[in-house]
Amino acid sequence: QKEVEQNSGPLSVPEGAIASLNCTYSDRVSQSFFWYRQYSGKSPELIMSIYSNGDKEDGRFTAQLNKASQYVSLLIRDSQPSDSATYLCAVRAVGSGSARQLTFGSGTQLTVLP
Amino acid sequence: KAGVTQTPRYLIKTRGQQVTLSCSPISGHRSVSWYQQTPGQGLQFLFEYFSETQRNKGNFPGRFSGRQFSNSRSEMNVSTLELGDSALYLCASSPLAGGPDTQYFGPGTRLTVL
């Protein structure tokens, strides 16, 4: 049974600060990692995907993956009030059958204070 | 490209009834996955379809079923509704089954069971 754990929230940061969101996973065969943002009452929206160890940057967002430590994180630089949302970490193994399903963490609620 | 569409957006049913939800994937996407999201359990995988075949199924009772049509549109059905079935039902599409492909979510159908 794959498990995905996210740092407990809620997390509050002042506008302009760096928000750091963390996620650990239990299944070593996990190969694909995703961060989704979900505003209240809306569906999850993909922010980042990462497949290889290291950092991946996209605008103000940086995803970091360390497969040896089974750890993936999301950094949001210059946080804006519009970043206030729940951030969901999701992992999936490459392959067929049950390995393919996306397993989500419970989410971290981020509030960016003006 | 148009995104994933789901109909209806809102539904109110009573216990014991059945319900059918519909999902149209992004054009060209052949894989459709369904998820249930509740405040207590978070996002949980229901099933995945590819080329009209169920490829993967989550840990839900047999009251939950689905199918996919030749045009990749998918439906899910819940029979004998229970109060605990009240949730946001999300459909996600991806181009392929297998590989590190990304899933894109529709707006969801909010089901309320009275």
Image (cartoon, coloured by chain):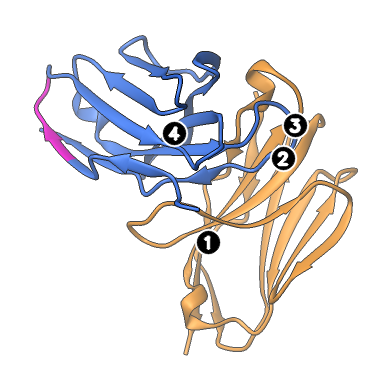
* Pointer 1 chain: A
- Of tags 3 and 1, the one toward the viewer is 3
In this picture, residue A18 sits left or right of residue A56: left
What range of the chain is rendered magenta?
Answer: B11-15
Chain with colour blue in the figure: B
The answer to whether residue A13 of the structure is visible from this angle is yes
Q: Which residue is mark 3?
A: B99
Q: Secondary structure at mark 4?
A: strand
Q: Secondary structure at mark 2?
A: strand
Where residue B21 sits in the image (x, y, percent)?
28, 30
In this picture, residue A43 sits left or right of residue B22: right
Q: Do circles 1 and 2 both sit on a common chain?
A: yes
Q: Name which of mark 1 and mark 2 comes first in the sequence.
A: 1
Mark 1 residue crowding within 10 angstroms, few (<14) / some (14–19) / many (20+): few
Residue B35 disc label:
4
* Pointer 3 chain: B
Q: Are marks 3 and 1 in contact (CB under 8 Å)?
A: no
Mark-to-mark CA distance, 1 and 4:
23 Å
Q: Which residue is mark 1?
A: A9
- Which residue shows up at 70% across the image and 69% down it? A75
Q: Do circles 2 and 3 both sit on a common chain?
A: no
- Of tags 2 and 3, the one toward the viewer is 3
Where residue B72 sits in the image (x, y, percent)?
47, 27
- The amino acid sitting under disc 2 is Tyr
